Image (cartoon, rainbow, N blue to C red):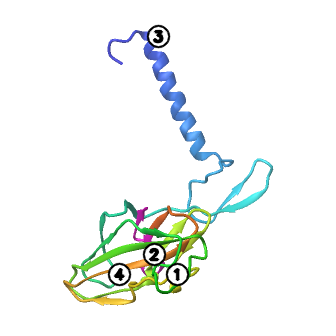
Amino acid sequence: MPGMGTTTSARWLRAVGLAAVLAMTAACNPFSSSPKSGPGTTVTTPSGHRTSKAIVIKTYRTLRAGQVAQVGIAGHAGAALIQIGAPKVSTGPLSNDYGYAPQHGYYVNFPIKMFDDGTSSVVINRLDFYVQVPGQGKVNTNGGNSPVSGAHEQLDTTELERGQNVSNFLAFDVSSTHGTFVYAPHGKPMVAWKY
């Protein structure tokens, strides 16, 4: 580096070289607990046991509740705009007149808005949405007492024509009021919202 003495420059080069060697060693270490290759990687542990590890690669955006996402939908020329609002949380039925309390502790009832800004119609299926809850996993609108929550309105399978929009709600029976709301048409996550 300019302005450094020979001793300081040599130390700096050794430090950079050591850092590079350590980085390469960590990347190539067969005993690493996090393999660097794709799904189904076989790892040999220091004791000689072979284990298979699945590596999850997240390939979708995560937004905050209230933000709008633009997503391309397979077989749909163009894109759809989706907005998921912050959920209304309830520990009882979602109606004063009917419905059951949540089986897992809470209902989270999300306002949802979708707009077809493509060049053809698009089908929106309520089961393309789920919430990921710590300790509970994936929960769709059929889980727990969601179908008998007493919600006045719930999104059902809907076909949107070009330029049309829909606003409705999706209720989930969950064990925690915090998690991630995911849009996954045909099981493939495309975008998520933290709530």
Give the distance between the C-alpha atoms of the residues marked 2 and 3, in whole angstroms: 56 Å
Say what secondary structure mark 3 lies in. helix
The stretch in magenta equals 182-195
Three-letter residue code for mark 2: Lys
**Who's the residue at 43% across and 16% down the image?**
9
**4 or 1: mark nearer the eye:** 1
Q: Is residue 82 above or below residue 38?
A: below
Say what secondary structure mark 4 lies in. loop
Q: Nearer the viewer, residue 94 or 5?
A: 94
Three-letter residue code for mark 4: Ala
Q: Quadrant of the C terminus?
A: bottom left
Q: Give the mark, 2 or 4, whose residue is nearer the N terminus.
A: 4
Q: Are marks 2 and 4 in contact (CB under 8 Å)?
A: no
Is 164 in the magenta? no
**1 or 2: mark nearer the eye:** 1
Q: Position of residue 153 (x, y in %)?
A: 38, 84
Q: Which mark is residue 74?
A: 4
Q: Which quadrant of the structure image shows residue 41?
A: bottom right
Give the distance between the C-alpha atoms of the residues marked 2 and 4, in whole angstroms: 10 Å
**3 or 1: mark nearer the eye:** 1
> How many numbered marks does the figure carry?
4
Q: Is residue 31 above or below residue 187?
A: above
Three-letter residue code for mark 3: Thr
Three-letter residue code for mark 1: Ser
